[in-house]
Amino acid sequence: MAQAVWEKPADAAKAPAVSRERLKFLIGGILIVGAIVYLIVSGMQAGARFFITVDEVVNSAQYAGQMVRVSGAVLGDTIRYDEATLTIEFTVVHIPEGQDVTGEALHNAVNDSNATQMQVRVEGQTKPDLLRHEAQAIMTGTYDADGVFHVSELNLKCPSRFIEGAPGEMIEAGS
Amino acid sequence: MLAEIGIVFQALALAASIYASIAAFLSARRRSERLLVSARSAALLTFPLLLGAAAMLLMALINQQYQISYVWQVTDPSTPLFYRITALWGSQQGSLLFWTVLMSAFAFASLLLNWRENHRLMPYVIVFQMAALAFFAGISLLIESPFARYWVTQPAPSLPPVVEAHLFIPTGAEAPPMVVQPSGDGFFTQGLAQTANGLNPLLRHFGMIIHPPMLYLGFVGFLVPFAYAMAALASGDLTTNWIKATRRWTLIAWLFLSLGLILGGRWAYDVLGWGGYWGWDPVENAAFIPWLVGTAFLHSVLIQEKRGMLKTWNMFLVIFTFSAVLFGTFATRSGLIESVHSFAQSAIGLPMFLFWLIMTVIGVWLIMWRRGRGELRDEHGFAGWLSRETLFVLNNVVFVALALAIFWGSFGAPIVSETFMDTEITLGAAYYSQVTVPLFAAMYILMGVAPLAAWGAMTMRRMGRALVVPLALTAVGVVVAALLGARSAGTLFAYGIVLLAGIVALYEIYRGARARMLTSRESLPVALLTIFGRNRRRYGGFIVHLGIVIIGIGVIGSTAYQLETIRQLGRSAEAQIGAYSVRYDSLELGQIAEDGRLMDIANVTVLRAGQPVAQIRPRVDHYPGMSVTIPGAHSTIEGDVYVLLSGYNEADGSTATLHIYVNPLINFVWWGGLILIVGTLISAWKDERAPERVRSAATNGRVGAAA
């Protein structure tokens, strides 16, 4: 009871000033939130890439000429590197969707003769240490009319040796 | 044997943490001091138990117990002792055990140090700390055990034997041979020691050795403020007690997290060989998001202490800091997100996701419940746009917006698009630069203006007057930057706002010292010591601001003015880059390092105005099945000439391809990091006077007792 008595008049006295202040802060807040949303939306327009498979980029016309991100398994025998012109060429193989990209998945992908393949060309870059047989290449670039995927950014992952592996395979391999 | 003891230690720690959590909860409900003391004893016990488990794993690593699958995965017979020890946190299972040890250490220390002062909060502090510990200890024991061992079983007489890792011995299993055996049975031509994996070469760097422990300390350190905030909400002690109790814990956690981030950047720069230190990779972002939310919390908590405002907001921030830690851990350890350095796919995804969800929901629910009861009402309203509290709120908005934008970019957009659009959309570097640069700019502007604002209200005119000197000095700084070669308006503006923040920090320190000199006639050094001693948090905070400013100078310089070229050079040929030229002298093929790896090393001379200024040796290290390109760098205050050996004639070294970067001012990033650490230490250091009082009280007590 006592509390109600001292709280209420205080609130009532402040009310008009508070609501005007509130309105100012509300408008300020809306402007700030609007600015942040604008930043994120414009950032997405600049930086958004579809992350698709080799199958999708090769077989659906909608991605032709568009900057996309593609994941594929590297075929070791196809890697060509010209040191003088800094051009890397290799072929990647489609990795089936819906499963984790493990060393086993990459191994199966490169040994699947029916899987879609795609030629890749990287210019003006040196050959990365991890570019080798059965590596996973994550490439940003465009699939052009010449049937070659022109890469502007190349990332590689090798899940096989240092992360998975079990002695079972190696022991049996030695037999 | 080591594995069995380790498992027993882990199981006891799990039991103790579950018991502590339940007993503490009951003690709070029944107001039973006896139960609380019992809960505390159990909680304190978890640390030595988990330390014991980690010691077992460490001994197994040092003694090369390759039957333990973790040991087999991360070391091999050629691994030097140092890397055997650091392999404790080199991969998923070991690092999870290590994580539980650190978590229990924080719980241990905070229970010992805060027990008396914060007795009322203690029951629920134990509940939440031990619930979190029980979860991680449980995962480490049951799902991702570092003590699983390889066993050979024979599924059927006709089939080849199978080697699999199991926590418990399967029936009829045998231990696999450790060393080479005669292949009499046709299967075991090689033993475990010969086939062992060894530590990933990319992780063999001092930054990678200290970076994960620092990051983990930062992560688990936020458990302390989180548990205290939850305890305040659950117990109803919503005064600033929980904030006072956790102020220094939060700073310590923040310190380690900052150190972890800086060391991670340094490792990337030294080892990954792309000339940069921050790549907006999801794993980096997962560590950066809690840092951002935690930084917002460190600032806004001041307003609650001084003005009794933002009570609900602070609760949200501290709970979301820890929630971000849990989410980041889940995202990087479960294989949810594709990243160059995430852990392998793992079964811990679902439990970790659920734990994150439950902790976050309980936290938010507790806040809304207390708020609904009117217990988190602010004591003051906002007085005006230029008051310090409003500017602090803006600072919070900036940090939270950064955290949200980065979260959306690394996790939100890919997951939402994958779920609802059937195609994954990822956001590249362009997204991050577009979104974060304006927000960082706002952060620096606020850093320059907010310290000058007064609590309560401030007029534009007074703010203008306070800004005159710093702005004048900033203008001088910008002119100097222009004379030194900064040309574009954008860069000059960026340097302007960063410098303003630094000058304001120095100016405030100077004003504090001058006031002291005038009132107590102290010399400048004595006055400085006094003000830092009296108000460590404020002045330590300004040193942290200086650190951030210096990092900013480095980031702007190394991004805006980076030069890059790739050239194939014959012997004695030079490549020109900026003010430097780089000459390829010779190649040393097949050098053998101490640990047995082969190195191909290029001898390269860096020249400036035709004069040699440094000899550097970029190289390629060859490990079995993997090569690592290690840059050579010539570092000066102006910046680095950073050279990668990215190709060479393998027969005679007649040509080499050098990938050359000039990274201006990059070393400011590391120096700024050091200053930031020093500032945080000053802020977190215990105030001088408190221990004296405690000590004298203790002495008096003893004297009294003796008398």
Image (cartoon, rainbow, N blue to C red):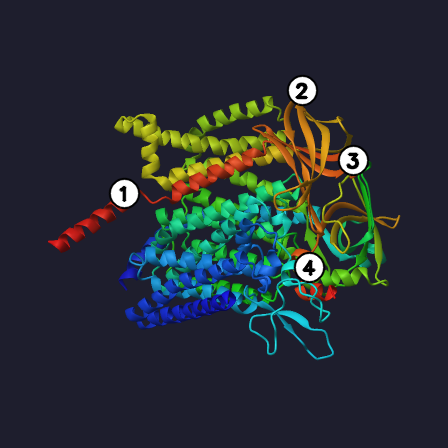
Q: State the residue at coordinates (69%, 51%).
A: B624
**Residue toward you, B542 or B177:** B177
Residue type highlighted by circle 2: Ala
Q: Quadrant of residue B233?
A: bottom left
What separation in Å lies between label 4 and label 3 (alpha carbons)? 52 Å
Dot 1 and dot 3 within a common chain: yes
Dot 2 and dot 1 within a common chain: yes
Give the label, 4 or 2, closer to the camera.
Answer: 2
Q: Is residue B145 above or below residue A14?
A: below
Give the label, 1 or 3, closer to the camera.
Answer: 3
Left or right relative to B54: residue B349: right
Under tag 3, what secondary structure?
Answer: loop
The chain holding disc 4 is B
The chain holding disc 1 is B
Tag 1 residue: B689
Left or right relative to B106: residue B618: right
Under tag 4, what secondary structure?
Answer: helix
Residue type highlighted by circle 4: Ser
Q: Which mark is residue B652?
A: 3
The chain holding disc 2 is B
Residue type highlighted by circle 1: Arg
Tag 4 residue: B417
Q: Is residue A30 visible?
A: no
Dot 2 and dot 3 within a common chain: yes
Q: Earlier in the sequence, mark 4 or mark 1?
A: 4
Tags 4 and 2 in contact by the CB under 8 Å rule? Answer: no
Tag 2 residue: B609
Q: Earlier in the sequence, mark 4 or mark 2?
A: 4
Q: State the residue at coordinates (73%, 31%).
A: B586
What separation in Å lies between label 2 and label 1 (alpha carbons)? 57 Å
Under tag 2, what secondary structure?
Answer: loop
Give the label, 4 or 3, closer to the camera.
Answer: 3
